[in-house]
Amino acid sequence: MHINVKDVGSGAMFLVIGLAFTWNGWRNLPLTTDGAIGPGSFPLGLSLLLTGFGVGLIIKAMRTEPATLTPISWRGLPLIVLSVLVFAVSIETLGALPALLASTFLAAMAPREANWKTATIVTVALTAFCLGVFIYALGLPYPVIGPLLRLP
Amino acid sequence: MEILDHLILGFGTALSPENLFYCFVGVLLGTFIGVLPGLGPTATIAMLLPITYYLSPTASMIMLAGIYYGSQYGGSTTAILMNLPGEVSSSVTAIDGYQLARNGQAGKALAIAAIGSFIAGTFATFVIALAAMPLSDIALSFGSAEYFSLILLGIVISTTLAHGSMVRGMAMIITGMLFGLVGTDPETGMFRFTFGMIQLSDGVETVAVALGIFGLSEILRNLEQNASTGNVTTAKITSLMPSREDLKQAAGPIIRGSVLGSVMGVLPGGGSILSAFSSYALEKKLSRHPERFGHGALEGVAAPESANNAGAQTSFIPMLTLGIPPNALMALMAGALMIQGITPGPNVVYQQPELFWGLIASMWIGNAMLVILNLPLVGLWVSLLKIPYSIMLPAIVVFSTLGVYTVNNSTFDLYTLLFFGLAGYLFRRFDCEVAPFLVGFVLSGLLETHFRRALSFSSGNLDTFITHPISAGILAVAALVILLVAMPSVRKTREVAFADSDD
């Protein structure tokens, strides 16, 4: 059987989100409070509608032409995710300078044609620019070198 | 004349050195990202939102607005010279513009595009100035029932007019609306959909959502393809001056494009993209020689370029006067106002007259700057395309990350950014446009509040939306739109109209 991946994929996403909100809302939120419309009704209407759309798209997928997806970049995707994660973990502990250096370098290595040399140059330039704009010009109170790296 | 006083106040504000500077920065940045494919005005504005916190409200609005209409100018330059539309709205311009360029008439096409944009920008500035006060007054007399119906109409129209699949568009709006409801319920104080995370009690951070769903997801999408900007051939620019005959030929399309673009810009889901497409179709229909279109018709450049600029500007009207952003970009502009503690809506014109009229006047000044920036400096902009994506990409990632963090100094917002970046990437892979998501995200709180307020006034009677005549009228229009779109003939036309618009 030919199935349209794009229809199934989007349908499944809408279905999952719709069900998650339906389930969470139904368990926690009253539909009415003191006779007036409560915090649960409006979202319940929306989440049921979304679940319906999800089911509809999955059914539609059985009847439409199959579609092909472009391949995921297995080099770029993890590097970008890592770049944001590393920044999140290190900004408050290691400080702005190491956080920016690490996350910029990871992002700079993400494109297929990236190489060590240009990535390093880009990293240094961008880090200097960000420190200049955000810390010195805008005066944001982030330590350039964080508490974990400071000598006692 | 009241309007004259307003314009004097506006120009007085916009001509202050500070505002003039940020207007220039805005249009310069706008042209820059307009030229570069892969970085749109919405993502750029999302990236700059955290910085606007440090500017005055007026300066930040002037700068962000400049980015939007500036990108319309920049997008046309590369569309004409290289058949490489920097923005979706310039992809129509590329059809005939590039043909003109190949025939050695690149200068003429560029000049007509700039002149058309400037005339349209001037026209749209006056439309906003004239329409703002009356619309705000009407909006102030609206009750919750009318507001609810109006927002609903906006949502209906924006799904039917936006390009891409309508079912997906509607589902994306609803998804956005659900995430927009996360946080504390304003009426009862209950936590909704926080899934045990205390950081979500104030709702999901708009900047993180916008940058994730627009910026990060776009980057992940671009990484899939080979970055290839290497072998584009640039047409030579000869004389920039159009002849008197060219001007005569372009005058009609420019005027029609300005008017049509202004109307389309106000519609929900409209803005520059829809304006450009519909005005191109109109000119082709009106032309005595429709076969020339696609082979270098000057009208095919003049009309869409005028229309996209007019539409970009008039899409400010519903956001500023009604408080209802008609598209994702305006949703972010509304966010920029809220960061400054100003609620977008009919009160802006009365409580912030300097901001309001200053912004409008700055649009005209910005348009004048753009003509100067674009025509003599055209060579400079074209050389920008030599910047490899491998430099652009880390810059976008780091500005987004750092920008999101600066909003609340919260690492939780960074995980939000990542979550919506990955979700947006999946949605894009499955052909779901992400713009409706952001519209739903911003509108849902407003829609629910008015829904509940209207019902509490009517003690729970749902017919309150029909017994109020204005509300009933608006709902009737919404029903009509749905009926129209369901008609097979209209549906076919819609599919044809958006056939070229998939980027």
Image (cartoon, coloured by chain):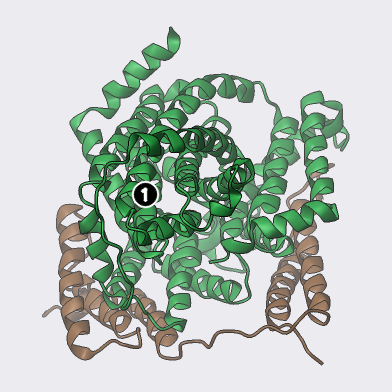
Residue at the spot 72% in from the left edge and 77% down from the top edge: A7
Residue at the spot 76% in from the left edge and 86% down from the top edge: A3
Residue at the spot 16% in from the left edge and 53% down from the top edge: A137
Disc 1, SS: helix
Within 10 angstroms of label 1, few (less than 14), some, or many (20 or more) residues?
Answer: many
**B337 or B230: nearer the eye?**
B230
Q: Which chain is brown?
A: A
Tell me the residue that label 1 is attached to.
B109
Q: Can you say which quadrant of the picture contains the N terminus of chain B? A: top left
The image quarter in which residue B34 lies: bottom left
Residue B407 visible in the shown view: no
**A29 or B384: nearer the eye?**
B384
Q: Is residue A20 above or below residue B59?
A: below
Q: Is residue B304 above or below residue B403?
A: above
Answer with left or right where residue A49 lies relative to residue B423: right
Which residue type does callout 1 highlight? Ala
Q: Is residue B223 above or below residue B291?
A: below
- Furthest-left residue in view? A151
In x, y percent, where is residue B278?
Answer: 60, 46
Rendered hue of chain B is: green
In x, y percent, where is residue B310?
Answer: 47, 38
In x, y percent, where is residue B499?
Answer: 64, 63
Residue at the spot 39% in from the left edge and 25% down from the top edge: B357
Answer with left or right where residue B111 lies relative to residue B143: left
The image quarter in which residue B498 lies: bottom right
In x, y percent, where is residue A12?
Answer: 72, 78
Subunit ID for the residue under disc 1:
B
Residue B331 visible in the shown view: yes
